[in-house]
Image (tube, helix red, strand yellow):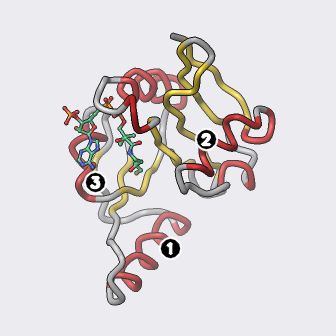
Amino acid sequence: MRIIRTRFWKLPAIARFILKHGFGITSALTNGRVYALLTNNTIISVCTINNLGACRELGSVITERAFRGQGYMHKLLRHVVSREGKLWLVCNPALEHFYAEFGFQRARKAPLPIALKIWISIFASFFGGRRVIAMQN
Ligand SMILES: CC(C)(COP(=O)(O)OP(=O)(O)OC[C@H]1O[C@@H](n2cnc3c(N)ncnc32)[C@H](O)[C@@H]1OP(=O)(O)O)[C@@H](O)C(=O)NCCC(=O)NCCS
């Protein structure tokens, strides 16, 4: 098992992995870092660090479906959080306890790019969308 740090466009397999799971290209657009956990050269888990100007966001937190619930994301996030320092994230409220294990706490106020995501989710919730929460470490 190894963890690598790269950029979205440098490794097409990572770009494919993120897009395949329905996540966006914010890290590519913001020239952010991408971390990936691999076993035998197979990508198991990925997350990105998106540079949003006012803050940095942990994004695209994904484990390949067949490998979920085996502690891979715990390994990856412990590594990433210890190296990247202060981060924000936006997540489904069901994951609040998961991210709390890495030192993230729910935030009432957030910098503009994060707040914008929250407001959009509040608006979308009127049409059946899911509301999200902001957390920071
Ligand atoms: C969330 C995710 C990245 C976790 O990856 P993982 O490698 O399975 O994580 P770990 O094995 O290290 O930890 C698993 C823990 O994640 C938490 N978790 C995962 N999915 C969850 C969900 N839908 N609701 C609540 N908790 C969840 C649980 O605490 C779980 O512990 P358990 O297996 O004892 O129940 C993975 O489920 C995934 O890729 N989900 C789809 C993408 C996604 O929703 N990403 C989060 C975007 S904010």
Look at label 2 and name its amino acid: Phe
What distance separates the C-alpha of mark 1 from that of mark 2?
A: 26 Å
Of 67 and 29, the residue lying toward us = 67
Q: What residue is at 49 percent from the left and 31 percent from the top?
A: 45
Secondary structure category for the residue under label 3: strand
Q: Which of the 4 quarters of the picture holds residue 29? A: bottom right
Identify the residue at the far right of this view. 10
Position of residue 56 in the picture relative to residue 66 (left or right): right
Secondary structure category for the residue under label 2: helix
**Residue 32 higher or lower than 1, as above or below:** below
Look at label 3 and name its amino acid: Arg
Badge 2: residue crowd in 10 Å (few <14, some 14–19, many ≥20): some
Position of residue 116 in the picture relative to residue 53 (left or right): left
Q: In which quadrant of this rendering is ligand 1 seen?
A: top left
First of labels 1, 2 by sequence position: 2
The residue that disc 2 covers is 17
Image depth: mark 1 or mark 2 in front: 2
Badge 3: residue crowd in 10 Å (few <14, some 14–19, many ≥20): many
Residue 2 placement (x, y as % from top left)? 55, 12
Give the label on residue 106, or none.
3
The residue that disc 1 covers is 116
Residue 83 placement (x, y as % from top left)? 53, 24
**Residue 38 higher or lower than 104, as above or below:** above
Q: What residue is at 39 percent from the left and 24 percent from the top?
A: 72
